Image: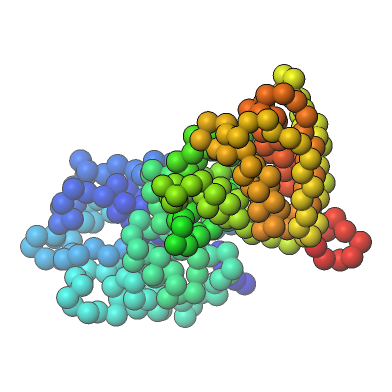
Amino acid sequence: MTKKVLFIDRDGTLIKEPADQQVDTLVKVELVAGVIPALLALKSAGYEFVIVSNQDGLGTPAFPESQFEEVRQFMLRLFASQGIEFAAEFYCPHVADDQCACRKPRTGLLSAYLTETSLDRELSAVIGDRDTDLELARNLGLRGFKLSENSFDESWEGLRHALLDRPRMAVVERYTNETSIRVAVDLDREADAEVATGIGFFDHMLEQLGKHGGFALTLECKGDLEIDEHHTVEDSALALGEALRRALGDRRGIGRYGFVVPMDEAQAQVSIDLGGRPYLVFEGRLNRERVGELPTELVEHFFRSLAETLRAAIHIELRGENAHHMIESAFKGLARCLRQATRRDGDALPTTKGVL
């Protein structure tokens, strides 16, 4: 029987990193934020936990084993009091210059354990706070997660979400001579959008997509605005569409179709089909050349580029007098379409063809 195992680093992942790597004392033991509820949820899902940690100089006068053992036992009792046990523990005492086979990211520390244990390699993972933990994961042929308290996606709650909720997440990085873009989406989590393109009104519109679309969105673009706004708007749309397409996966279980958004005197009629065929119909006349720093001629171009990489048919019909209201109603209308069309309900593929 295969096991779902999480190989977890100790310092910086389970307990906070001590200020001095050579000092382990009880007064320094502090749990990393969110670790207890996350591990309890993972335990309930059938995961086992194994500690894998480099402990430089363990057993030397500067780092005596008695001192380490005192902290170790305190930590284990603390976790046990919350219902969390560790199936095994492995500690490497060597420093990098020793070139030993057991120091992470090498896998020697786990050789005997892996010989005796049949891993579920699709679901097992390595969790740590350093790049060496990610490298260990690659060497083991497992997924790797790098913990950070500065980002939800890399917090313990974010890792729990990634491991247990079958989240539809994607990260796209796009680099050209004109733009550098990073987009991250999570279709199954709502959060305030984090957007920075250098074009204020455009940022505001992209924030509407995340807010009203019901998904977490992070988008950062550094573009050649000293030339004009075209590349920033176009490439942001292309990267966002690709991220949404990747997050949707095979589109199994989605609503597929999505709707009319009024905003004062303006109204947008928007419909979408996430059927895999890109197409845009855009009808509406914007009576200003710019809204803020966004040229209005790029609005239709944004939706066309998005439809292209999302592989969706998008129809937008705008009417109104205020260009700001018209554009915003279009973005909000598309967002509401995406909320409806990407909502997951079951596992059926929404097509009679057998593939989207």
Kindly tell me whether residue 153 is visible in this rendering.
no
Res 126 → quadrant:
bottom left
Q: Nearer the viewer, residue 198 or 320?
A: 320
Relative to 233, 348 lies left or right: right
Position of residue 140 measured from the top left corner of the image (x, y, whole percent): 45, 74
Q: Nearer the viewer, residue 148 or 181?
A: 181
Question: How many numbered badges does the structure rendering display?
Answer: 0
Query: In this picture, is 194 found above or below 100?
Result: above
Colouring method of the image: rainbow
Q: Which residue is rendered at x = 55% and y = 54% of the image?
A: 235
Q: Which residue is rendered at x = 31% and y = 63% of the image?
A: 53
Relative to 99, 257 lies left or right: right
Q: Nearer the viewer, residue 170 or 55?
A: 170
Query: In this picture, is 188 found above or below 173?
Result: above
Quadrant occupied by the C terminus: bottom right
Query: In this picture, is 260 found above or below 12?
Result: above
Kindly tell me whether residue 31 is visible in this rendering.
yes
Relative to 273, 229 lies left or right: left
Q: Which residue is rendered at x = 51% and y = 49% of the image?
A: 232
Query: In this picture, is 113 found above or below 314?
Result: below
Position of residue 198 measured from the top left corner of the image (x, y, whole percent): 45, 41
Q: Nearer the viewer, residue 28 or 345?
A: 345
Quadrant occupied by the N terminus: bottom right
Position of residue 80 measured from the top left corner of the image (x, y, whole percent): 42, 47
Q: Which residue is rendered at x = 19% and y = 70% of the image?
A: 95
Position of residue 116 measured from the top left corner of the image (x, y, whole percent): 48, 78
Q: Residue furthest top?
A: 264
Relative to 96, 116 lies left or right: right
Q: Residue furthest left?
A: 61
